[in-house]
Amino acid sequence: MFISLDTDKSEGDVETQIVLPLLRNQEMLGVDLKCIRSKEHFRPIDLDKGSSKKKGYYPDFGVFIDALPVCIIEAKSPVNDVAEGYREAALYALELNKKFESGVNPCQCLIATNGVELYAGYWDSQAAIKCHVSELAVGSKTLAELQELVGFGSLDSFAKQTNAQIRLEKFKRPFNQGEGPTLINSSVGNNSFAADLSPILRRYFTSKGQTDGPEIWEKAYIASKEVTTYDKALESYLKERISTAKASGKKLLSPTKNRESSLEGAIRRYDAERPIEGALQLVTGAVGAGKSLFARRYKEKLQPPEIESKCHWAFLNLNDAPPKFEALENWVCEEFVKSIQKEGAPIDLIDAEMQEKIFSANLTQRKAYYDRMNSVEDRRGDLEKARDIEQWRQEPETSAKAISRYLHGDRNENIVVVFDNVDRRSAEEQLVCFQLALWFMAQTRALVILTMRDVTFELYKNEPPLDTYKSGTIFHISPPRFIDVVKRRLELSLEALSAEAPEKVEYSISSGARIAYDGRQASDFLRVVYEEIFEKPRNISKIIEALAARNVRQSLDMFMSILTSGHMPEEELARVSMGSREARLNEYTLIKILMRGDNRFFSNSSGLIANIFHCDNSWKRPSNLICVEILYLLIGKRKAKGDNGHMGYFSVRSIASKLEAMGFVKEDALGACQYLVSKALVEPDTLSLIDLEMTDCIKVTASGFIHMRILSERIEYLSSVLPTTAINDERFSDRIFDAMKTENVAGKLSLSRSLTLTRQLGEYLSAQRKELRKHDGYAAMPKTGADYIIGHIESSVEKVSSDGPIGRPVQQDLLDTI
């Protein structure tokens, strides 16, 4: 039971001793703590009270359910009039409700108390309950009436009713009608020009088998000194922070054409000290930074002769590890036995004489048994020995230990085992691999080289099990730029085309005509594609580098898709291949290729470009702007210290809270963050693409930035995402589907049709923004992601329609200034 407060108590005493216990106690109103908001959550409003005006008023507490303010609570000190507090709360609720349409009033209930008396009622009427605080005893009639009026169950019911009134309904993707599903899944195949050249091109522009061929690790490797600088717009997203890389005992690996001194030093120390527990060397870097290629290149090309003669290597590809990492120790030993033989170690587990050398220690332990068996029966001991050897040979762990003992002990040589592609696993799995490496190292006395994501190490280096490596030196690999990798591969492919291309190459153009040309002219095509993308002052190179991030593997696949795409018009290829220097690869064509891949239309599973207008009809309050707002928020905070202590990383919970203050639902924000993670527009600190929790931290990627900064003002992007964008405007959805059918027949959509759809997209999103502005928190925002995107859409339509604004001063883009 509450006790009325004395008059010497303050407003703060009322808040802490009366209001919060009343709200939170399950025997009282039972309001969930996460739904209670303090005064910092509210925007000050000037209240008109007849002849006087109260400026900058905001209530003490509010109950928010699904981002809706369902109840306003005003606390006064015991010397103040509770009726005045009730009137102020009612006026504030009126201001909140006025933003919504007639009949839609999310703020339904009011509570006011001065610690002695309490008023409660509906926002548009006099207080229905007036009582002394001391009357609110558990089980009392007064408390029961208050619970029925403003208990959590009642407030939740009010929120559901309002949500049903304001929720945008019937979102559907335009292609989901008629023959749309068939069209969206249809493909265009490769262009006929590249068909005869594909085998040669794939040798150099594919991520598969990049560490296998000598030509790649001998000629295509980019040394550290050869890496060029990034464009300023992408620098903060793609450029590695050298100061961070050098901190905490890190060494940047700087391989030249013939040597890498850091790893060489580690191997020499291992050889000199021959530690009984083995040794572990971490190599960190981004996914696709070239860690695998570096390890292979060092083994094949950079080892000094005296090290090469004593070192036996094994490469364990953790991409091939068993699902859920089951029986992982057994798998590692099995792969080690296979790999060390494949890599040329002087062992042969099939040869009988070699078997006895390898398992000699095991045989020695069983010698007395074999002797007794021979004394019982002639050569019985030899039979038992053969059986034991065969059993040991079938046991991966026993074989791995025996091979290691033989090479390291009997031959006094070194074993280097590379745990490769660990960086492609989730953060949790990478930590498991670290523990696995320690176990394997102890079993075999090997020097284990473990590749790990730099992000994983930085986030978990002070926690078990990585904290055990604090005193160790970490080697770090900085990835080469996409442009540098492609240029080197281009040089190799031009050599191969000159030597191997067919004498004549034929292909068809849309008119049906067949064009034949000298195969050696294919090199002209490759050169022009490279020049158009990377050497002209255009944004397409920024788009491509942002999509590839620092992943060399992905960048190679991307360039190959451009070369072979069926969206590359053969007529354009004809002009290029016939030596026309006026030929130009249009930016919209390249964006189309990156968006659609082999598909005729853009979809959620095609290409490397994502749909920032994604929404899900199953969300509590679907919106095509929620992903935009998340990206805008994270871009603005990319240089700020995050919730996990690292720059740009913020928890999903804090992001969802900020969006809730703007009128979005927390659960919807989580779903949108999960989508953005799956499309690599944001990156979680767990590195998992599957399960995202509220406690996980995320940051925007270069791809997320480029989607907002550049793609959002490209007509090709804006019109192409529409067929698979969930739309709740049936007429607009039908227009999109009609345009889709037209494009399927004609092969492309006219510019005027694309412009019309893009203009209508801007109007459609503006209507959603208008709805969001009814929420007090959204209306108070000086600039939103929706403002930015809609501004981009409108300016792109104006620019293309008028071929660019004339005489208008060019303003710096907002995202370039934050």
Image (cartoon, rainbow, N blue to C red):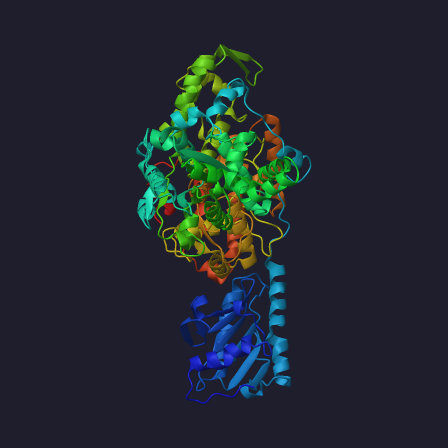
In the displayed structure, 332 sits above or below 122; it is: above
Horizontal arrangement in the rendering, residue 661 relative to residue 479 (left or right): right
Horizontal arrangement in the rendering, residue 744 relative to residue 317 (left or right): right
The structure residue drawn at horizontal position 52% and vertical position 21%, both measured from the top left corner, is 199
Based on the displayed image, in which of its 4 quarters is residue 278 positioned? Answer: top left
Based on the displayed image, in which of its 4 quarters is residue 598 positioned? Answer: top right
Work out whether residue 437 or residue 370 is closer to the camera in this orientation and state it: 370
The structure residue drawn at horizontal position 36% and vertical position 28%, both measured from the top left corner, is 535
In percent of width and height, residue 770 lies at 51, 54
Based on the displayed image, in which of its 4 quarters is residue 642 positioned? Answer: bottom left
In percent of width and height, residue 191 lies at 54, 22
The reply to whether residue 718 is visible in this rendering is no
In the displayed structure, 309 sits above or below 777; it is: above
Work out whether residue 455 or residue 649 is closer to the camera in this orientation and state it: 455
Which quadrant, please, contains the N terminus? bottom right
Work out whether residue 352 or residue 666 is closer to the camera in this orientation and state it: 352
In percent of width and height, residue 405 lies at 47, 40
In the image as oriented, which residue stretches furthest toward the front?
Answer: 375
Number of marks in the image? 0
Horizontal arrangement in the rendering, residue 183 relative to residue 448 (left or right): right
Work out whether residue 173 or residue 531 is closer to the camera in this orientation and state it: 531
The structure residue drawn at horizontal position 69% and vertical position 37%, both measured from the top left corner, is 178
In percent of width and height, residue 315 lies at 48, 36
The reply to whether residue 312 is visible in this rendering is yes
In the image as oriented, which residue stretches furthest toward the right?
Answer: 178
